[in-house]
Amino acid sequence: MIDLYSLSLDELTDLLGTWGEPRFRAKQVWDWVYDKRVTTFDTMRNLPSTLRERLATETRIGAMTLAAEQTSRDGTVKRLYRLDDGQLIETVLMEYDDDRRTACISTQAGCAMGCVFCATGQMGFARHLTAAEIFGQAALFAGDLEARGERLSNVVLMGMGEPFHNYDASLAAIHMLMQRLGIGARHITVSTVGLVPQIRKFADEGLQVKLAVSLHAATDAERAALLPVNKRYPLVELIGACHEYVQKAGRRMTFEWTAISGQNDTPEQAHALGKLLRGLKCHVNIIPLNPTVGYAGDPSAMLRIGDFIEILEDYGITATIRIRRGIDIAAGCGQLKSDVMSKPPRIPSTTETE
Ligand code: SAH
Ligand code: SF4
């Protein structure tokens, strides 16, 4: 079946043309999918029923089926989708009081980067997602929101996988988010483990899309123990590329710091981080570790993170604690998949409120 998200308007026009449909039909379907954001064909009222039926038989809106869904106490929705080849990917929707609706989407099934504390890293790499599969996760949430009069406002490429390891598809998906869902570049964030050549390339794209780099340690030995990629791109190269990015983009960037008790929340790491980032226009987001089965570490205590932030302030670096949304449904990347894989399968589309 053809995924409509994978077609441009011209390609859709060609497809419907081979079915003997007049050209304007493609634009009508396009408007239903992207302006009205419907996710089924029966709602496309201005199309002849024969066309709706053919669309429903030969095409689909989003090449994925819901395998599980959980809703957390704070309203965070986490979905597990099964792709056509059976791969499972996760997508999270976070709702904030100020109307922000943020989708956190995956770019790969699994991940090849092997970060030790990450559930996705612990699974290994399965495959890259296509641009339509990446975009589709956000588009399906946008459709559900639209149906209740709300709008998807932000997208973060922070789900499963490393977006810059799947650079072209991730960039294509970002363009689709902007063009087809009208999401402004400043409302899109791409998070990378620190692939230096791609950070440089991204800086040259001239996009207003925000960049986040997962740092997690400020010395090479400590970082390499958590993130194997650091052996390939050590800190001096990574921070060099970040300076280039900030200079070219003319805007500050973000560093992510998963706080692990006794590992990277020490005063030594805080001072090393202060020295490393001094003079760089940036902000540090500190996220207490979400425990995973494959890693023995514990999240840092809040007090300890407070001390850490105070040290950073001495270096002129701002940092804030981010509490992971959906903590009660393990909304950390890769965690729903590991959960589902270790239990009998859930019935599709059940909503759990725990
Ligand atoms: N591959 C990209 C984007 C996906 S991971 C990257 O690594 O940046 C998104 C963020 O979640 C990263 O900062 C990652 O380090 C963090 N993360 C992964 N596992 C985590 C866990 N168990 N607890 C807290 N943060 C985690
Ligand atoms: Fe991959 Fe990011 Fe997880 Fe590292 S933290 S294994 S790069 S998804």
Image (cartoon, grey):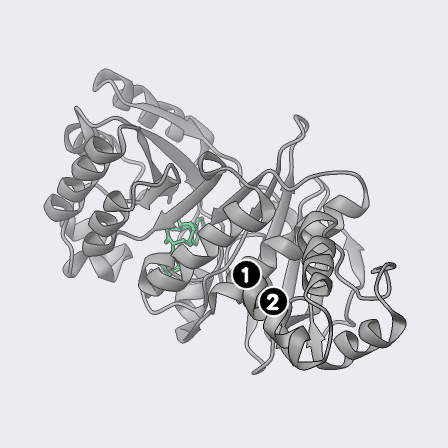
Which residue is drawn at the image coordinates 72% and 42% (left, top)?
Answer: 75
Question: What residue is shown with label 1?
Answer: 335
Considering the numbered disc 2 on the image, is that residue within a helix, a strand or a loop?
helix
Residue 215 pos. (x, y %): 28, 44
The answer to the question of whether label 1 and label 2 lie on touching residues, with beta carbons closer than 8 A, is: yes
Q: Say if 345 sits above or below 339 in the image.
A: below
Q: Is mark 1 within 8 Å of ligand 1?
A: yes
Which residue is drawn at the image coordinates 38% and 48% (left, top)?
Answer: 191
Question: For the residues marked 1 and 2, what is the alpha-carbon distance in whole angstroms?
Answer: 6 Å
Q: Amino acid at mark 1?
A: Gln
Q: Amino acid at mark 2?
A: Asp
Residue 296 in view, yes or no: no
Residue 322 pos. (x, y %): 48, 34
Q: Which class describes the residues within 10 Å of circle 2: few (<14), some (14-19), or many (20+)?
A: some
Q: Residue furthest left?
A: 236
Depth order, front residue of 109/168: 168
Residue 214 pos. (x, y %): 33, 46
| Quadrant that contains the N terminus | bottom right
Depth order, front residue of 20/255: 20
Residue 33 in view, yes or no: yes
Depth order, front residue of 176/246: 176
Is 123 situated left or right of 317 in this image?
A: right
Is 291 situated left or right of 149 in this image?
A: left
Q: Say if 224 sits above or below 103 in the image.
A: below
Q: Which class describes the residues within 10 Å of circle 1: few (<14), some (14-19), or many (20+)?
A: many
Which residue is drawn at the image coordinates 75% and 60% (left, top)?
Answer: 39
Q: Is mark 2 within 8 Å of ligand 1?
A: no
Q: Quadrant of residue 18?
A: bottom right
Q: Quadrant of ligand 2?
A: bottom left
Is 266 situated left or right of 289 in this image?
A: left
Considering the numbered disc 1 on the image, is that residue within a helix, a strand or a loop?
helix
Question: What residue is shown with label 2?
Answer: 339
